[in-house]
Image: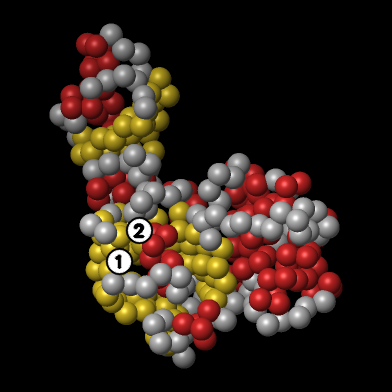
Amino acid sequence: MTPDILTVQNLTKSYGNTRAVNDLSFSVRRGEIFGFLGPNGAGKTTTLSVIEGIRVADSGTIHLFGLDIRKDTAQIKRRIGVQLQSTSLLADLTALEQVKLFARLYGRAINAQTALSLLEQVGLTEKANTLPAKMSGGQQQRLALALALVNDPEIVFLDEPTAGLDPQARRTLWELIRKLREEGRTILLTTHYMEEAEALSHRVAIIDHGQLLALDTPGALIAQLKGLSALTITASLPVSEIATLPGVQNVSQEGDVLRIQTNDAPVTTAALLTLAQTHGVALTDLHVQQPSLEDVFLNLTGRNIRN
């Protein structure tokens, strides 16, 4: 059995004059959680939709389970689970009824007990007879995940599964994703949350403007920044002047929060204090951190992932 469950080669997809995916190649190993990390509009959702057979690529090849996505689309779809970025739940059906209906769409006539076991798997047993409108955002996301599992898929595609959720709901969904992997499933998820990619993924592909910038384990990607530290400060200071301070390698700004990569944190910190004094600005929330995936993206692109 091949160690790769999915192979994508030279994938290209455009919408009019906009190239959403640009000559993208990567592979996903069986049994791993593979993270697609990048900002909104980077091409993550388009890539997934082509792999899932929802859209057709302009060029390139995709093999899933050793099958060609163009020739064997129907066979592949029976073996995958998909949670879209936005799932439209049926407003007039309870959670239990929705699971049973989605199972029938896959040709499985499951009884109430089997449907309940799926809801139990995602922690929604007590919401079995509840309509979506009476559920929280996190509970709706878990129901969408249950619907993605009705056909007992070998690989599950999760597109921004925790977007818009509060921290507690996000971590609850993380645990569910880990359990799916422990069951032997392969998970491919997209996210623009650095901590999510770092916490869940065995390997991370960083994508921007439809191109693959880097692919490795989170630890290996961060290790490439050996010798760099990250300073975060809250202050209204000119980015152009910060960029010229000793030790500074990169600067990104989000509102009044500045993230500074430096190869000499003490010297850069002292220079920052002097610069702030010159401008009559107080530095608040000054933190020195070890590099993270945020810094990997900044190092690759020169900007913050959320900008």
Judge from the rendering whether residue 175 lies leftward or rightward of residue 47; answer left or right: right
Q: Is residue 106 above or below residue 95?
A: below
**Mark 1: secondary structure:** strand
Q: Quadrant of the C terminus?
A: top left
Q: Amino acid at mark 1?
A: Lys
**Residue 27: horizontal and vertical position, in percent?**
37, 75
Residue 192 seen in this snapshot:
yes
Mark 2 or mark 1, earlier in chain: 1
Cβ atoms at labels 2 and 1 below 8 Å apart: yes
Q: Amino acid at mark 2?
A: Gly
CA gap, disc 2 and disc 1:
9 Å
The residue that label 2 is drawn on is 43
Q: Is residue 130 above or below residue 274?
A: below
Badge number at residue 98: none
**Residue 182: horizontal and vertical position, in percent?**
61, 71
Judge from the rendering whether residue 182 lies leftward or rightward of residue 223; answer left or right: right
The residue that label 1 is drawn on is 13
Of 217 and 130, nearer the camera is 130
